[in-house]
């Protein structure tokens, strides 16, 4: 077990040292399909089309059946991309199966918009309905009527500006509303809104006007983004890239949750990342990438990390996002994020600032079991729950929550893991352990013994599934579809396993 602990620390050290390449993100059906459609030619993209077809499930849809809300965008996108790929093996059958899938799916936007709807759903899904109507005639697809007024409101707002500034949040969905390349300009990385789909759309329109330096930058960006998926297939893209702030911020925050932030074996890569964050954090805060709009979530986590590293962190950078009793992730967002407010609460408490209103908001957003769910950036309740427990316990030595602890222990599956879907996942099991680590500190002997038994079962489950340098593949993070920020998730998996080993006394 000592050897395994050393191997985990070595892999973590390697992951942290790699975080200067823009980030690692698993492949996206949605972005790959949109890019193929905008590319216009099947020739030269056969491998990407084959990859797309291979991701289709037996029921004809794309995306996890465990989370049906997130299947519409990738399935619409894949169906429309494959419409023009008839000669390729399997394409026609895939289109037929996708058509059947969409015809029988309940419309989650028939009467209202769910709180955890995918990013840009109000722009993306109605546009798909329009495209499908012209391509596929009178097929009775879901029409998403609750999204239509939201889309119109967005379009009215966009119609009032000639060009959005680089990094504006609405550029992330430019492919769903942009038609003229003059309404956007690639950022310094070459992206339109750190979105491969938006960049591919912009590039297609821009090429009709001839080659320019901006066109070359966008093309180079798409090549780099494709490599970030590690799929080895040209034309397969991630859902978002780069994530050169989000990836290191969340990774170091995760190390803290596991008790690894100050581990001597990780000191050097942690120091390097902290120094970079300190330089990058401006009075406006930080966004998920250097050239994207600042938001409360990334800013709050960056403040936590900097404070934990002993750096001065100015809370005023977070106050820009405070409206009433809560913090908005981005100004003008459709609905607030529970986890953004959890992270804001954690930052405020670490910095010794008043946080009564934020704390009350976090407490009020539990489900009847005392846990946190319905989160807009992650599909699993275990993610916000682990972070909320850490935030609420910060600065409260006697903090205890019997209701949340009982629900968390009860949610452990028979196999020893945790998961919001039909199966346990390594990532979610790690989040459960992070929460239990905090709760264990305020338990009496009997409670701690009970927790230790639960952790022992989790360790057994994790050991049976651990493989060195394995790439996570289960997408649980909410973008335009569910996606997997590979290194962020792998750091969580390894930190969870290390914590369980240490708990058992085997490290």
Image: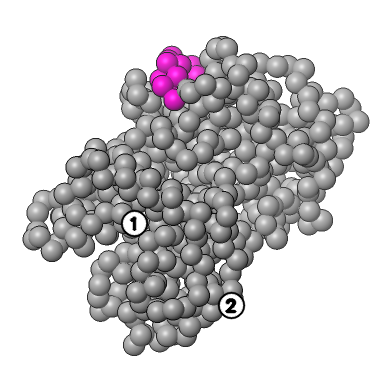
Q: Is residue 284 left or right of residue 444?
A: left
Q: Earlier in the sequence, mark 1 or mark 2?
A: 2
Q: Is residue 128 left or right of residue 465?
A: left
Q: Which mark is residue 353?
A: none
Residue at 27 percent of width and 48 percent of height? 192
Is residue 440 shown to the viewer in this render? yes
> Dot 2 surroundings within 10 Å: few (below 14), some, or many (20 or more)?
few
Q: Which residues are magenta?
A: 307-321
- Provide the major secondary structure of the magenta segment: loop
Q: Which residue is mark 1?
A: 176
Front residue (pair 234, 147): 147
| Marks 1 and 2 in Cβ contact (< 8 Å) | no
Front residue (pair 53, 322): 322
Residue at 29 percent of width and 39 percent of height? 167
Q: Which residue is mark 2?
A: 58
Residue pushed farthest right?
446
Look at the picture and state if 303 lies above or below 461.
above
CA separation in Å, label 1 and label 2? 28 Å
Is residue 234 shown to the viewer in this render? no
Measured from the top left, where is residue 36 in percent x and y?
32, 69
């Amino acid at each position: 077990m000592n050897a395994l602990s050393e191997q985990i620390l070595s892999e973590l050290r390697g992951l942290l040292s790699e975080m200067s390449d823009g980030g690692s993100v698993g492949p996206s059906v949605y972005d790959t399909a949109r890019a193929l459609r905008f590319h216009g030619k099947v020739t030269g993209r056969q491998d990407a089309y084959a990859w797309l077809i291979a991701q289709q499930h037996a029921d004809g849809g794309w995306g996890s059946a465990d989370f049906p809300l997130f299947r519409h965008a990738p399935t619409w996108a894949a169906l429309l991309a494959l419409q023009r790929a008839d000669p390729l093996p399997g394409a026609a059958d895939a289109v037929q199966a996708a058509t059947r899938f969409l015809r029988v799916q309940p419309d989650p936007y028939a009467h209202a918009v769910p709180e955890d709807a995918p990013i840009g759903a109000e722009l993306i899904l109605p546009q798909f309905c329009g495209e499908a109507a012209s391509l596929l005639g009178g097929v009775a697809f879901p029409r998403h009527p609750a999204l239509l007024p939201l889309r119109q409101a967005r379009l009215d707002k966009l119609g009032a500006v000639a060009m959005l500034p680089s990094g504006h949040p609405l550029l992330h969905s430019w492919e769903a509303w942009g038609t003229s390349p003059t309404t956007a300009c690639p950022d310094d990385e070459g992206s339109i809104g750190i979105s491969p789909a938006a960049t591919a759309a912009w590039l297609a329109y821009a090429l009709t006007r001839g080659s320019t330096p901006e066109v070359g930058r966008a093309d180079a960006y798409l090549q780099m983004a494709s490599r970030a998926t590690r799929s080895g297939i040209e034309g397969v893209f991630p859902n978002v890239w780069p994530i050169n702030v989000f990836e290191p911020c969340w990774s170091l925050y995760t190390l803290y949750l596991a008790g690894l932030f100050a581990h001597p074996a990780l000191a050097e890569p942690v120091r390097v990342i902290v120094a970079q964050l300190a330089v990058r954090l401006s009075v406006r805060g930080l966004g998920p990438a250097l050239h994207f709009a600042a938001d409360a979530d990334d800013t709050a986590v960056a403040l936590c990390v900097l404070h934990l590293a002993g750096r001065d962190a100015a809370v005023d950078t977070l106050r820009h996002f405070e409206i009433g009793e809560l913090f908005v992730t981005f100004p003008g967002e459709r609905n607030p994020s529970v986890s953004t407010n959890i992270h804001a609460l954690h930052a405020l408490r670490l910095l010794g600032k008043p946080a009564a209103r934020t704390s009350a908001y976090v407490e009020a957003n539990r489900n009847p079991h005392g846990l946190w769910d319905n989160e807009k950036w992650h599909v699993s309740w275990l993610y916000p729950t682990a972070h909320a427990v850490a935030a609420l316990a910060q600065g409260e030595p006697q903090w205890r929550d019997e209701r949340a602890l009982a629900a968390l222990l009860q949610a452990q599956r028979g196999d020893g893991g945790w998961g919001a879907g039909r199966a346990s996942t390594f990532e979610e099991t790690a989040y459960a352990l992070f929460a239990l680590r905090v709760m264990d500190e305020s338990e009496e002997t009997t409670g701690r013994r009970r927790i230790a038994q639960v952790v022992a079962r989790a360790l057994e489950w994790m050991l049976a599934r651990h493989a060195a340098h394995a790439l996570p593949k289960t997408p649980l993070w909410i973008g335009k579809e569910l996606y997997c920020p590979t290194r962020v998730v792998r750091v969580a998996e390894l930190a969870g396993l290390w914590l369980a080993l240490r708990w058992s006394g085997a490290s």
